[in-house]
Amino acid sequence: MKKILIVFTVLILLGLSVGGGLFFVFFYPFMQKMKHTTTIPYDKQLTLIIGGGGNSGILVSDSAVLVIDTKIDEATAQQLYNQVKQLAGTKPIIVVNTHIHADHTYGNKLFKGQTIIAGGNYDKEFWIKEDGAESLPTVWVKDSLVLNMGDETVTILNLPFNAHTQSDIVVYLHNRKMLFGGDVILNHQAPALFAKYNADGEGYLKAFDLVEKRFDIAEVVPGHGEVGGVEVIDNFRTFFKDMKTASTADASTENALLDKYADYNQIPVLMSPMAVEKWFKNSSAK
Ligand SMILES: [Zn+2]
């Protein structure tokens, strides 16, 4: 009995140190990198804040200010909030969350009393459990919503199928031909496909087609990674198609396809090309 206990303890300690090692080698630097922010004064009305969690946009019009996503922690959320307040003054603020994840919603609580929009397929209780009651949206969009913001028209579209989560929103600025993709569109980063949020690899592929068909896109602000043109969507589509192909390919093709994305920003096992391939393997096994 004693022997078993010792073996058990050793195994647990080993497990903890491997877990801890993984944390320090991969997760911690990933998170640190994620917290870095860069402000891009895009034009007179539009400011982009890249990093600090999900990428954000601040669009100022005469009557209101639109804020897309509210960052990942106390420091980045406060920085965003200060920038918004400086640009908005006393104008009403409309926040849009592209999805439920805390790297896009942490700062919601700072916008208390303002409008906070999110996708309508989330259960309120689920949101509270994930992000806390103080970050709860006030408007749930089931289909789409069009906002007239001075000379810009904004379409807020709730995807009609699961992709990154069960209720992903993309935001399109018509005059600027700019799409904010949330985590449905990433630039040079592996996505997180978690069952808890009903992530769906096939949904991503559908989403790329849907946004390109519905909107005339010249500029893409991905959920994470650098701003670019429509090639950001096309590259990410190729990534998904490659992982789908890899999931049924022979070993050498599979390895070549995985290697192609070795330089993607990622966390092994959790958020990696291999994890996406695994999603397709599991879905075809069903
Ligand atoms: Zn994210």
Image: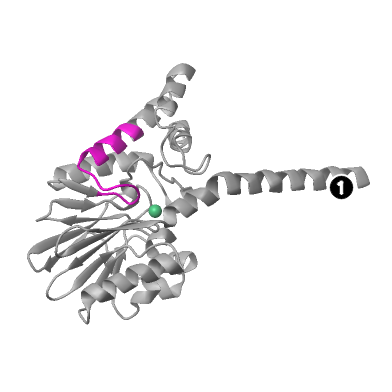
Residue 69 vertical position relative to residue 78 in the rendered view, above or below:
above
Question: Where residue 178 appears, x then y in whole percent?
Answer: 17, 52
Question: Where residue 254 appears, x then y in whole percent?
Answer: 44, 23
Amino acid under disc 1: Leu
Which image quadrant for residue 70?
bottom left
Of 75 and 72, the residue lying toward us:
75
Give the labeled residue for mark 1.
5
Q: In the image, what residue occupies the spot 36% across and 69% down?
A: 79
Q: In the image, what residue occupies the spot 33% across and 45% down?
A: 186
Q: Give SS at disc 1.
A: helix
Residue 122 vertical position relative to residue 31 in the rendered view, above or below:
below
Pointer 1 residue Cβ closer than 8 Å to ligand 1: no
Q: Is residue 129 magenta?
A: no
Residue 88 vertical position relative to residue 105 in the rendered view, above or below:
below
Residue 97 vertical position relative to residue 25 in the rendered view, above or below:
below
Q: Is residue 227 magenta?
A: yes
Of 210 and 80, the residue lying toward us:
80
Question: Where residue 232 appears, x then y in whole percent?
Answer: 26, 40
Q: In the image, what residue occupies the spot 21% across and 51% down?
A: 179
Answer yes or no: is residue 221 visible: yes
Magenta region = 221-239
Which image quadrant for residue 154?
bottom left
Question: Where residue 267 appears, x then y in whole percent?
Answer: 50, 43
Callout 1 environment at 10 Å: few (<14), some (14 to 19), or many (20+)? Answer: few
Of 123 and 113, the residue lying toward us:
113
